[in-house]
Amino acid sequence: MKIATWNINSLKVRLEHVRSWLASAQPDVLCLQELKLADEAFPGLAFAELGYQCATHGQKTYNGVAILSKTAIEDVTRGLPGDPADTQARYIEGVTGGKSPVRVASIYLPNGNPVGSDKYPYKLSWLKRLKAHASRLLALEERLVLAGDYNVIPHDIDCWDPAAWRSDALFALDTRLAFTAFQALGLTDAVRACHAEPGLYSFWDYQAGAWQKNWGIRIDHLMLSPQAADRLEASGIDKTVRAWEQPSDHVPVWCVLAD
DNA sequence: ATGGTAGCGGTGCTA
């Protein structure tokens, strides 16, 4: 079973990119972030044509997440539990995979910039809330994949220039400490489990020719429960997509689990 | 030192 995550920065603009990638990469499950669409505007038919069912948690203008799957998506949760006052559409979870069931979440963690604004404590509290929810999910002892745009650079080797990112909300010490505590619940980073080398990036800024200079960062992650990690066969980042016409600033990240 | 890009929506916010 191939499971992927991709922040597409507007599904309206990127629909044909997503359809092309689905047709060629053939994932069983694709988690999308930054739809920037209300559920009423979600192009479900365009994915049904390719054999995918969809569960969506949309929002107009900002955020918005979805799960696409070749099999039925059940037991769907919309919104990250733990704060009824949080109305931003950044989390959807469901169980899919047919005879090889896996619980999958599509996550769009707050960016948090600038550090010092009220956006940063929102990011940290959101990550803490994700940790609390993940702890409950791990107790189920299921195959679990928490996939998405975490807006977290885990380590120095995950960015081109660590010094340039040191004071950024994606790499600040408190961010990395909170992410480390989350991962220490027993989650495996699917890309790092298969690839030790530096310079694996999933995002290149639109500005300053970042793609051409390879000024990238790795912020899109697939975090696996022990039951999923035991079945991990391969993982990767489809960076060629970043060179497509009018691309997202993120590229798909994927893993393969044995059925 | 500054600005550099993209999407949404029709101005400034978010990233």
Image (tube, grey):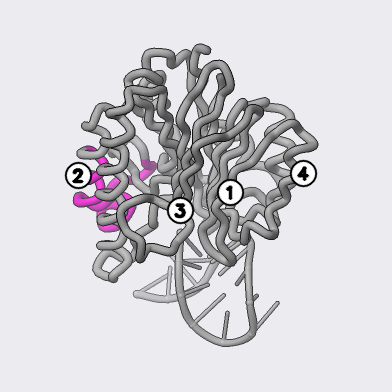
Marks 3/4 same chain: yes
User: Of callouts 1 and 4, which one flags the residue occurring earlier in the amino acid sequence?
Assistant: 4
Q: Give the side of residue A153 with respect to residue A28, left or right.
A: left
Q: Are marks 2 and 4 in contact (CB under 8 Å)?
A: no
Per the image, the residue denoted by label 2 is A177
Q: CA distance from mark 2 to mark 4?
A: 41 Å
What stretch of residues is rendered in magenta? A159-180
Between A41 and A148, the one lying in front of the other is A41
User: Of callouts 2 and 1, which one flags the residue occurring earlier in the amino acid sequence?
Assistant: 1
Between A215 and A221, the one lying in front of the other is A221
Q: Give the side of residue A147 with respect to residue A136, left or right.
A: right
Q: Chain of mark 1?
A: A
Per the image, the residue denoted by label 4 is A46
- Whole-percent x, y for residue A189 in the image: 36, 28
Frontmost of labels 2 and 4 is: 4
Q: CA distance from mark 1 to mark 4?
A: 14 Å
User: Of callouts 3 and 4, which one flags the residue occurring earlier in the amino acid sequence?
Assistant: 4
Per the image, the residue denoted by label 1 is A56
Q: CA distance from mark 2 to mark 1?
A: 31 Å
Residue A1 in view of the camera: yes
**Residue at left offset 64%, top offset 41%:** A54
Q: Residues within 10 Å of mark 3 (few under 14, many from 20)?
A: many
Amino acid type indicated by mark 1: Thr
